[in-house]
Amino acid sequence: MKIRFNENEDIVKEIQAGLKARDGYCPCRVFKNEDTKCMCKEFRDQIADENFEGYCHCKLYYKEK
């Protein structure tokens, strides 16, 4: 399993700025809780599936098979 940043540097910079402004919580989510702390629960659950390949919700990370 390999997890990498999105290849689009503009998206990475935008999401990282949002994370910084929200104290590490996903800028794409309304609520701040442990499930939305980056790396969010949704993506942690997705990457636990060995067959999953794709981006996290905010497109910051990509999991390769």
Image (tube, grey):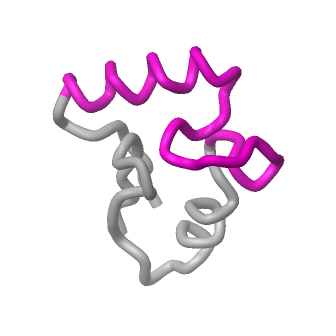
**Which residue is found at the position 63% from the left and 40% from the top?**
38
Residue 14 drawn above or below residue 62: above
Please give the name of the residue rendered at 57% of the width and 49% of the height, measured from the top-left corner. 29
Q: Which residue is drawn at 62% across and 47% down?
A: 30
Across and down, in percent, residue 27 comes to 52, 36
Residue 25 part of the magenta segment: yes
In which quarter of the view is residue 37 placed? top right
Q: What segment carries the magenta color?
A: 9-38
In which quarter of the view is residue 23 placed?
Answer: top right
Q: Residue at horizontal 36%, vertical 69%?
A: 65
| Image side of residue 19 versus residue 22, left or right | left
Residue 34 in magenta stretch: yes
Instruction: Please tell me in which quadrant of the rendered image residue 19 appears.
Output: top right
Q: Position of residue 47 (x, y in %)?
A: 54, 67
x, y (%) of residue 6?
Answer: 27, 40
* Closer to us: 43 or 19: 19
Q: In this view, does 45 lie above or below 34?
A: below
